[in-house]
Image (cartoon, rainbow, N blue to C red):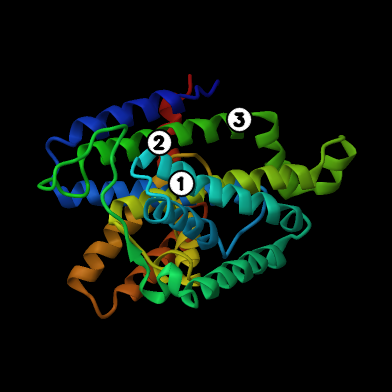
Amino acid sequence: MVYRDRTVVGLTATLVILLLAESVLPGWALNMISMSLANGLVVLGLMVIMRAGLVSFGHGLYFGLGGYGAALGSILLGVSDAFILVLLGVMASSCVAFLLGFMMARYRGIFFALLNLAFSMLFFGLLVNSASLGSTDGFSIPAPSYLGYVPSVAETRVTFVLYSMICILTYLSAIAVHRYLSSTMGYIGDAIRENEVRIEYLGASVRQSIMIKYVISAVLAGMGGALTVLLIGHVTPEDTVYWTRSGEFVFVAILSGTGHVVAPFLGSAVFELVRTYALQYAPDVWQMLLGATLLLVIMFLPSGIWSLIQKVVRPRLET
């Protein structure tokens, strides 16, 4: 039997459905989808390094760099175009990741995870002690424009243009990561997780491969942070850089699984739904409900939610 990879077709169909659904979905649903996609980008970045056997407990650093890069571009530089603001956020996160990557590529296991957490908390400390960056209160940014189009004051912040922008950027990112993971460099990540020594014997550089994956992961996290700030209109250290935010991304990554590029977005959507309804109907114990959800997934779906989808869908795609 030959497995037919229809990832691009499936992603394209999903994009079309999401764009068409904008006209019939209520505002809260559009906001939830947008948040799920933006956070899913960060989890997608985590998936890239997790396939190489690495886990980061500090990816809030790059999420925050993306958010603050976009926010400061709007406030200090006077940039109003959303696409440029996202680009500024991605540049901020990718530049820092490139510099730290030389160090990170040397560590594995718990050392890699906690070193990321350490840098994340250093950045958090810098933000909360800097009055010019808003300290613990952060600061708000005005609604952006989109290639010259300026939404009217009467429109909500989640406009069709912003919603479409998030959907399209997510679509392009997912396809790019799918192509990367299907390439030789992408498959090296699986080999690194199993046996680094053999990779070196084959002539490939493990450190170089990990550094590339680390930068890709930071780019996706920065993009997710920038889109989230544009969506919310406000940025604070606690909501972006604090360790609980990084833990949330790892939570969703475990919930999702690493079997497919769709998994992070599926897991992010499930997480947003559980959190939203848990906060609404059980505000005093919503953390327990999230923990119970993760516990059930680990017990019955150790490879994440995607493993359940794979068991149902994949047999139908084989001939």
Indicate the secondary structure of the residue bearing disc 3: loop
- Pointer 3: what residue? 182
Q: Is label 2 in contact with label 1 (beta carbons under 8 Å)?
A: yes
Label 1 or label 3, whichever comes before in sequence order:
3
**How far across and how far down the image is residue 315, in percent?**
45, 30
- How much space separates mark 2 and mark 3, taking CA atoms? 20 Å
Nearer to the camera, 262 or 4: 262
Q: Which disc, if any, is residue 223? A: 1
In the shown orientation, is residue 61 left or right of residue 289? right
Q: Nearer the viewer, residue 307 or 96?
A: 96
Assign a secondary structure to mark 2: helix
Q: CA distance from mark 2 to mark 1?
A: 9 Å
Image quarter where the N terminus lies is top right
Sequence order check, earlier mark of 2 and 3: 2
Mark 2 or 3: in front is 2
Please indicate whether residue 66 sits to the left or right of residue 120 in the image.
left
